[in-house]
Image (cartoon, rainbow, N blue to C red):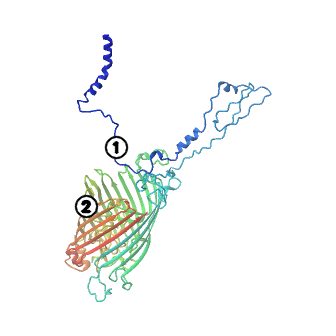
Amino acid sequence: MRARFALIIAGLMPLWPALAQRAQLPRKGRTFEKSAPRSFDVVRKLPRKRPMEELVLPPSPLQVLLEHERAFERPVQPLPEDRLVRLVRPAQGTTPIGPLALTPAQPYDVLPRPALSATLALTTFVIPPARGIDDSVPNRWRIRFPQWQRYDNAALDTVYAKERRLDPFNRNVLKGDYPILGRRNFLNITAVSESSVDMRRVPVPSVPSSDRAGEFGFFGNGNEFAMQQNFRLSFDLFRGSAGFQPVDWEVRITPEFNVNYLRARENGLVLIDVRQGTGRVDGSAGLQEAFIEKRLGTNSTASFRRKRDADDNGSAYFDFTSVRFGIQRFTSDFRGFIFSDEQPGTRLFGTFHNNVFQYNLAYFNMLEKDANSGLNRWRHRNQSVYAANLYWNDFLTNGYNLNFSALYNNDQPTFLVDKNGFLVRPAPVGNPVPHKIRAAYAGISGDGHIGRINVSHTFYQAFGRDSFNPLPASKNPQHINAQLAALELAYEKDWMTWKTSFFYTSGDGDINDGRARGFDAIVPNQQFAGGGFLGNANLADRGLINNLFLGGGTNFLNRSPIPLTGTGLTLFGVNSFIPSMRAGLFEGQSNFINPGILLANAGFDAKVTPKLRGTVNVNYARFMRTEVLEAALFQSRIRHGIGVDSGFGAQYRPLLNDNIVITGGFGALFPSDGFKNIYNGRVLYSGFVNVRLVF
């Protein structure tokens, strides 16, 4: 009896903790829930078009193949005596059994069971034809997806994008989403329409044949109205999937068409013939890109091994070397300080060391530019430019990049009168004699961020020789020794970016000492201190700045050309803060006898919404030296102050992309004492609206 009781106690021991916990529930203030659990509604329900159980999708190719295999029933396994029948020799006088017919439900390797006979002969086997199953590999670019929408509102979420020929946002054979020929050859067509309207007031002279009778002032009415329409088409045919590795080869052709209109208030400004009036309508066409690119190979030690397949370039990081021949776009540094243009040439470029280093070796044989549109003309200007640069990404710290640049400009003596009748080479001042310029540039630039601070800086040293400059009284050559320095610091916080900039170019203080100390560039397109708002400064090092923007920014100095009245020279050209005193905007030669500039900038950029952004910039500028201005204008005691240049702009993207971009801005220059000595005290301004449509 005691033994049974002990066994019962031992059996209940594992249940003791559970019973003890249940007994303590009333003491702990908890009671059992006897009712059914309550159901809660989902906080947020998406308006589905149909329940998931009602959704019927077409069968996949794998399901179709499985159903086809199941259609053939597995036959009955043959009996042992059936296997022995084939080993029995036929009796004399009997006829062997011929091939037996197969039914569709039986496989080809098993014959149907015939009637058994002792005189059966060996069966004659016949190999049937192969099954009619399509085992070809489908084109992976043309896989069709079912037409299915997750929600009632088609704008909420599109699961499977359709193919539309005229829609660049969906799969499109014209935008390189599908191969145009074979499986590796693609075509990308880009069409750009750009419309600009500008209104400005610049200082202009009043010529003897004034547009208004009775006007005797030295300075005339400087109000101008300009319109410009550009159409740019680009046809890009390439081989290879550029999203995964550099293209094998590429052919690109980009023609551009321009129509421009200018209305001034004084004669002799738009055309040298005062009888032509104050208005001008002009059109031109130019071939801006026409090149062939070929990838030569890889830049790694793995290039000496055998290729695994056709897409193997020998490097896991796709370091490569390519050559490009023809009219192409090239920018020598991050912000386009020295050279940014579309010119015919040869360029060797590539990457190495896991894309840490990027290099360019380029030669350009320059074309003439149209005076009114800036497009290429089919005429050589006897000027050659050599460029070499090296980008060092993540230098010392992640996100900070260096650029080492070396350029050489060989500009031969030429004579040119532009299509408007103005002399641009040589410069129509002093003793206008054609001369040769050989100038070299060596510079280092940095762009990126160090911690929370965005940093961009540049320093260039120019040296060389100008065979003859029209301003000095001496006919001796000028030895070039000039400098450029720029620094920009920016701090980003949420949607705001605060920045400050400094820009400096050296000036010439003595034009007769045989030394040209004023800095000038080759073809500048400076995205700095308020410039580059229309373009993308981050793409400058890849040569993607559009140099046809009138200044590319919002401030007055880097957008509107300012003529040096009475000389035929331009003090400030578009896209540049350098007071170079060139003749013409696009066709003049570099001039290293100029006053130089010192500029300080404070700016603010704001991303107001994902569709709207704005910028505000205030610059204070002054000349470094004014002796060259006094010699050119035959005027003494010109001071250094230029004035305060302020500007603001806004850019709106209604589709949250760059296919439709509307940009507007306004800039004003409040002259200081030096600018008043040259011109007058009137406030100068410029306003613009730009509409860009891209397919």
Asked where in the image residue 594 lies, by quadrant, the reply is bottom left
Above-or-below relation of 278 to 185? below
Above-or-below relation of 496 to 411? above
Asked where in the image residue 68 lies, by quadrant, the reply is top right
Q: Indicate the position of residue 398 as horizontal and vertical percent values.
A: 30, 50
* Residue positioned most to the right: 93
Q: Which residue is mark 2?
A: 487
* Residue positioned most to the top: 1
Left or right: where does residue 234 sit relative to residue 209? Answer: right
* Residue positioned most to the front: 35
Q: Which mark sits nearer the N-terminus, 2 or 1?
A: 1
What kind of element bears circle 2? strand
Q: Indicate the position of residue 30 as horizontal and vertical percent values.
A: 26, 33
Q: Residues within 10 Å of mark 2 (few under 14, many from 20)?
A: many
Q: Residue at x 22, y 72 (%)?
A: 643
Can residue 336 be spotted in the picture? yes
Left or right: where does residue 231 sit relative to residue 567? Answer: right
Q: Indicate the position of residue 111 as horizontal and vertical percent values.
A: 67, 33
Asked where in the image residue 648 lies, by quadrant, the reply is bottom left
Q: Which residue is mark 1?
A: 40
Q: Indicate the position of residue 540 as horizontal and vertical percent values.
A: 35, 61
Residue type at mark 2 is: Leu
Q: Residues within 10 Å of mark 1 (few under 14, many from 20)?
A: few
- In the rendered image, the quadrant that contains the C terminus is bottom left
